[in-house]
Amino acid sequence: MSVATADRSRIDLSSKTALLAAGDLGGILLFVAVGEYTHGYNPLVDVGRVAGTFVPFLVGWLLVAGVAGLYASDAPGTLANATLVTLLSWVVAVAIAQALRATSVFHGDAALTFAVVSVVVGGLLLCGWRVVATMALGR
């Protein structure tokens, strides 16, 4: 099996997976926007700051979600599997985001407290979305 074949089996380009991806990215963006707001920034005005916080999480999520099969043809799968895979993927994505934030490319740093908040709050948003999506898609 070639790498291209393996990649295609993990990512299905369909309206269902596009919906899943849109919900995932919306959840991550909501997490970031609310976080920026609680720290005194207006997400509608400080768009550059929000984008600078969002991008490391986006990169982490995109690197992990495809490999984890969250956009495969059989996604979201069973309710338990969808929730577990989403949460584990998010934990790894947060680790990647924190590593990126520790560089000079992105603002912020790799704070343990922010990592914990990211896992908990972002994980609740993503898992909640995936539960709704799994139920709506009839799995």
Image: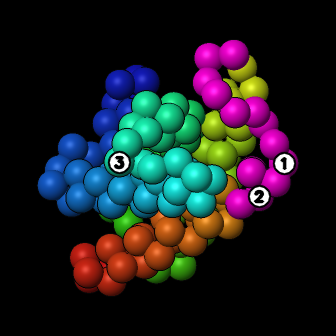
The reply to whether callout 2 and callout 1 are in contact (CB within 8 Å) is yes
Q: Earlier in the sequence, mark 3 or mark 1?
A: 3
Q: Which dot marks residue 44?
A: 3
Q: Position of residue 39 (x, y in %)?
A: 63, 53
Q: Is residue 47 left or right of residue 67?
A: left
Q: CA distance from mark 2 to mark 3?
A: 26 Å
Query: What crowding class fits label 1: few (fewer than 14 Cα within 10 Å), some (14-19), or many (20 or more)?
Result: few
Q: Is residue 28 visible?
A: no
Q: Position of residue 25 (x, y in %)?
A: 38, 51
What residue would you read off at disc 2? 116
The reply to whether callout 3 and callout 1 are in contact (CB within 8 Å) is no
Choose top left, top right, bottom left or bottom right for residue 138: bottom left
Secondary structure type for disc 1: helix
Q: Which dot marks residue 112?
A: 1
- In this view, the residue in front, 56 or 35, is 35
Query: What crowding class fits label 2: few (fewer than 14 Cα within 10 Å), some (14-19), or many (20 or more)?
Result: few
Query: What crowding class fits label 3: few (fewer than 14 Cα within 10 Å), some (14-19), or many (20 or more)?
Result: few
Q: Is residue 34 above or below residue 92?
A: below
Q: Earlier in the sequence, mark 2 or mark 3?
A: 3
Kindly identify the residue that appears in the image at 74 percent across and 51 percent down. 114
**Of circles 2 and 3, which is in front?**
3
- In this view, the residue in front, 2 or 138, is 138
Amino acid type at circle 2 is: Val
For the C terminus, the quadrant is bottom left
Task: Report the magenta residues as a range.
Answer: 104-117
Q: Position of residue 135 (x, y in %)?
A: 33, 83
Q: Position of residue 10 (x, y in %)?
A: 39, 44
Choose top left, top right, bottom left or bottom right for residue 137: bottom left
Q: Is residue 83 above or below residue 94?
A: below
Q: CA distance from mark 3 to mark 1?
A: 27 Å
Amino acid type at circle 1 is: Leu
